[in-house]
Amino acid sequence: MGKIHNFTAGPCLLPQAAIDASIEALKDFKGTGVPVICISHRTKEWESVMNECRALWRELLNIPEGYEVVFLGGGASLQFLYVAMNFLEHKAAYLDTGVWASKALKEAKGLGEAYAIASSKDKNYTYIPKGFEIPADLDYLHITTNNTIYGTELKEDLNSPVPLIADMSSDILCRRVDVSKYTVIYAGAQKNAGPAGVAVAIIKKEALGKVSRYLPTMLDYRVHIDKESMFNTPPVFSIFVMNETLKWLKAEGGVDVIHQRNLKKAETLYAEIDRNSLFVGTAAREDRSIMNVCFVLAPGKEALQDEFLAFAKERGMVGIKGHRSVGGFRASIYNACTQEDVEALVACMQEFESLKA
Ligand SMILES: *Cc1c(COP(=O)(O)O)cnc(C)c1O
């Protein structure tokens, strides 16, 4: 088999160093002679992984004092509920930038008053709404920083007069963020931070404990903070792989270094989409995501859809079919994706153009 270039949206490619270390740990975890998935989470060897992983999150995102890092099961989708449970008392607003954002809003509506402060649904979420007023009396404003399905991204930390809560599932660790501007940042790990099975939440501790509802034990962020994410059995293998992914990122130079690479990859791919007569980008230019690049065939060329997918597959491209709600193509170019992967896709698009245009 030739070289594979994996552009899947998630779960997706991970750094080879993280995969290799995980394979080793499945054979022998830290010299214990026991596979990592067969050891008690109440051992000092395991606790050292938890501590290292928390410390790496703090270091890589420069998380200030007063914030806690927790690892939870249930993916980002359960965080939608956690957020509303732990913070919705009077009223919350959600920026409706796609399916994930509206799913988050749905959970809040089930518990109280919540509404979409602005929406880009009118144009199938191909842009990020701007210029909306944020009322000062909200419990929080919820945003989705990167819209995985549509390829739009909020590239700067929003200034919000009310507590800001962000789903960063598909762009966490792709750039530096000012954590102090957020009350909660959460992410399912399986795009930029590790494999499926664990979500990370970075929480401003003093903001907790202000709601009057009963909080079920497992849905109370304070429980997981107090128990250092070991109230119940944590998803050990997912956390192990996440830790190795963070170690890789640190060794590469951290988020500023990876951000520069991400910008270059995105620029390379968008430049080809804009140049190539067969393709057009779908996201508004100023909101183009540097993680998920969405494009379709140019008007009149739509019939080439399946042919291009087959053509790309033969050349080792994996996972470039667009989400079913958008169609076309999507190349996810997360942190572990290399410039070489992107250039292989560009070469494939150029070759296809030379045959079909
Ligand atoms: C993938 C994704 C989710 C859903 O994550 P799960 O872990 O599958 O629940 C939520 N939000 C965004 C932005 C995503 O990309």
Image (cartoon, rainbow, N blue to C red):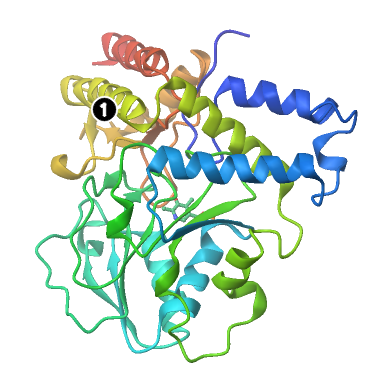
Residue 77 in percent (x, y) is at 53, 62
Are there few (<14), some (14-19), or many (20+) residues within 10 Å of tag 1?
some
Q: In this view, does 213 lie above or below 306?
A: below
**Near-viewer residue (340 or 233):** 233
Residue at far right of view: 33
Give me the residue at 27% from left, 8% from top. Answer: 354
SS at badge 1: helix
Amino acid carrying label 1: it is: Leu
Residue at far left of view: 131
- In the rendered structure, the answer to whether residue 105 lies left or right of residue 282 reads right
Give me the residue at 37% from left, 63% from top. Answer: 101
Instruction: Inspect this view and state whether residue 54 appears.
Output: yes
- In the rendered structure, the answer to whether residue 235 lies left or right of residue 326 reads right
Q: Mark 1 points at which residue?
A: 263
Quadrant holding the C terminus: top left
Instruction: Inspect this view and state whether residue 190 appears.
Output: no
**Near-viewer residue (323 or 108):** 108
- In the rendered structure, the answer to whether residue 142 lies left or right of residue 309 reads left
Where, by quadrant of the figure, is residue 214 drawn?
A: bottom right
- In the rendered structure, the answer to whether residue 139 lies left or right of residue 32 reads left
Quadrant holding the N terminus: top right
Give me the residue at 36% from left, 32% from top. Answer: 255
Q: In this view, does 44 lie above or below 78?
A: above
Where, by quadrant of the figure, is residue 322 drawn?
A: top left
